[in-house]
Amino acid sequence: MKRISIADGVEFLEAPKQESWFMNNGLLISGEEVIMIDGRFGGEETLAFIRENNVSRYFISHFHIDHASDAWRIAGETDCRPALNSTEYQYLQSSENMSRATGYGKAGVHRLVEEILMPKMGLQYIPSIDPYELKDIEAISKGQLLAVPAPGHSPGHYCLYAPQSNYLYACDLGLDRFGPWYGFPHCNLNDFLASIKKARELGAKQLFSSHSPVVRERVGEAIDRIEAIIERRHEKVLNAWNKGKKTVKEIAQEGIFFQRTDVHGKRAIPVMSYWQESMVKCHLDYAGLQAEDIE
């Protein structure tokens, strides 16, 4: 794991593996207290890092499974307290809350998520998890980081800008090979595109994120690529619609987002199919189109 200074008292923590569901990059902020924002380097390695650096709180950037996994271990095996942004913290408190927030319950796949994906990833609910506000990050960093709300990926998703160095931590905006992810009912392409615009307008010199290596050159192009991926997907969805495919399920069968839905095993196919259908619906909503299989 590499540590890269991006501002006074703020380090970027680069995980050993990029583009991984089981690891993500994060930030270490040593200010009014020592906190981490995300950062998963392997279960034991993460716990050891927290202990060695006397991290008092672990801020989960957003509630998605690849970010919230192992937080229950941090709560139970260290003196560090996990917290989740105040918009989303209740989602991680119970099965019922998670089922509603993700739409898994309504789609009939919540049991599969709990039986297959959650054990695989190491996610457990934390009934007592604390909320945090974005202003807390700004205060703890003594103004070295400015919080930029960036919904679209999730309701409480955000980026963090370091004005001193002109560096941007884009979190999960979509810099990895897959690109932007918006597979839950609360995801919204208008919000996502507005968040991309915010990131672009900051004119950052270097770009840091959850799942990708540091972008040190052509930062603007890297951000433009996120929008371009959305545009290409949108064109494919509209092409399918114009060819007479008027239901979400029909368009989802085109494999626009996931060419394979069995990467987590055959039993989990309904879960990935649900993500695919949710992303199709995002594009139809963005185009103002009503699919025949949507009530």
Image (spheres, rainbow, N blue to C red):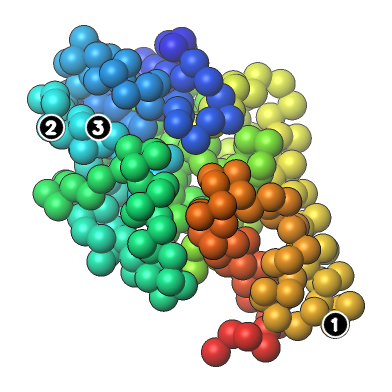
Q: Disc 3 marks which residue?
A: 58
Regarding residue 183, the answer to whether it shows in the image is no
Q: Which of 160 and 164 is in front in this view?
A: 160
**Could you tell me how far apart the alpha carbons at marks 3 and 2 are, in whole angstroms?**
13 Å
Q: Which amino acid does label 2 sit on?
A: Gly
Please, is residue 26 above or below residue 283 in the view?
above
Q: Disc 1 marks which residue?
A: 244
Tell whether 184 sits left or right of 101: right
Q: Do tag 3 and tag 2 residues touch (Cβ < 8 Å)?
A: no
Element carrying mark 2 = helix
Give the quarter of the figure containing the N terminus. Answer: top left
**Could you tell me how far apart the alpha carbons at marks 1 and 3 are, in whole angstroms?**
49 Å
Q: What residue type is labelled 1?
A: Gly
Mark 2: few/some/many CA within 10 Å (<14, 14-19, 20+)? few
Q: What residue type is labelled 3?
A: Tyr
Of the numbered discs 1 and 2, the one sitting upstream in the chain is: 2
Element carrying mark 3 = strand
Of the numbered discs 3 and 2, the one sitting upstream in the chain is: 3
Q: Disc 2 marks which residue?
A: 76
Q: Which of 3 and 240 is in front in this view?
A: 240
Determine the residue positioned at 36% across, 62% down: 111
Q: Residue furthest front?
A: 266
